[in-house]
Image: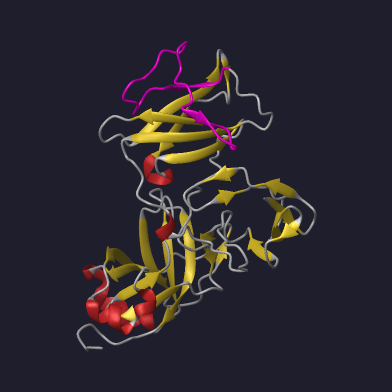
Amino acid sequence: MLLRTADGTTARFTGRDAYGAFAWITPGSGTGAIRFTVEKDGVPDGPERVLDVTVSGEVWTEQNNTTVLKARPKSAYPPQDGTRAVLHYHRPDGDYEGWGLHTWTGSADPPEWNDPILPVREDPFGLVFEVPLNDGAASLSYILHKGQEKDIPDDEALDFSLYGHEVWRVAGDPTYLTPSPGGAFGLDLRAAEATWIGDDTVVWAGEGSGVASQQLVYATEGDLTIENGALTDEGQWLRLVPTELTEAQRSRYPQYAQASAFRVDPRDRDRVGQALRARLIATQRADNGALLGATGVRIEDTRPEGTGK
């Protein structure tokens, strides 16, 4: 299969994860929307789709469907094996002879430099390395190398809280191709991908990657906008904690039965009324406070907790 953009750029779907096959391109500086088709033997599988790279750099789509998902589909990715790290390594030149993996922190059995971990297999994307981990390991330190030649000069570390236990890397680029840290929604306040369903509860699709916290944000004065990947005003926060929908909520809103659900932290519930009278947005942040996702909140129900269906 082939990815083809409106300007003629092409890329083959050489990678594969739990969702399916994937391809990647490098957008030029200042790129906004990218129009693309997916082809097999020169025939598009369906209509043209649109990717807005200002909102999300990684998207998911299906055959014969114009929908482009900006959040990792929760149901498509089973829980990862926390006892091992899996690293997929792609070299554009296709030359993999002699390349191995040196590991230390987090590795259950660190190898000697001259006896690196060898790939367990090679697939269309490239080499696949599997590394058994110490119990409770939070990260894996590693170097991809061929003898004394390193893939990049610096030591690398895979942070499991940000990227999970399986990643894809392209030679010479320390940034992981996938997964990329990001919220369950992009940085787009024009959209409303979160829904308030009453009972101090908000729902949205997906979970995101590298998310450490989520909150509802509102401003008592002025407006909230995004500039350079951050909110122009931090506003007032309602902290959110993960929850499960009650049977009454599932009955009232069956369309959200598979959604991620959150309740306002009890410490902030006295300000819910004030928040609902303002413009309300949902945000997700990394553990360093970086904004990973921001979207508007659609108000489905404002009834207070305990008022029934």
- Residue sitting at x 55%, y 57%: 229
Q: Of residues 184 and 275, which is closer to you in this image?
A: 184
- Which residue is at 46% across, 77% downward? 221
Q: Is the magenta stretch mostly helix, strand or loop?
A: loop
Residue 32 location (% of width, % of height): 69, 60
- Inspect the magenta stretch and tell me whether residue 267 lies in it: no
Give the percent coordinates (x, y) of residue 100: 51, 21
Q: Quadrant of residue 166?
A: top left
The segment highlighted magenta reads: 98-127
Residue that appears at 47% across and 57% down: 72
Whether residue 68 is visible to the viewer of this picture, yes or no, is yes
* Number of numbered labels in the structure image: 0
Instruction: Indicate the quadrant containing the C terminus: top left, top right, bottom left or bottom right.
Output: bottom left
Q: Closer to the camera, 52 or 60? A: 60
Q: Residue 211: x, y in percent?
A: 40, 54
Q: Is residue 236 visible?
A: no
- Image quadrant in which you'd find residue 258: bottom left
Who is closer to the viewer here, 262 or 79? 79
Asked if 164 appears above or below 199 in the picture, the reply is above
Relative to 280, say whether 154 is above or below.
above
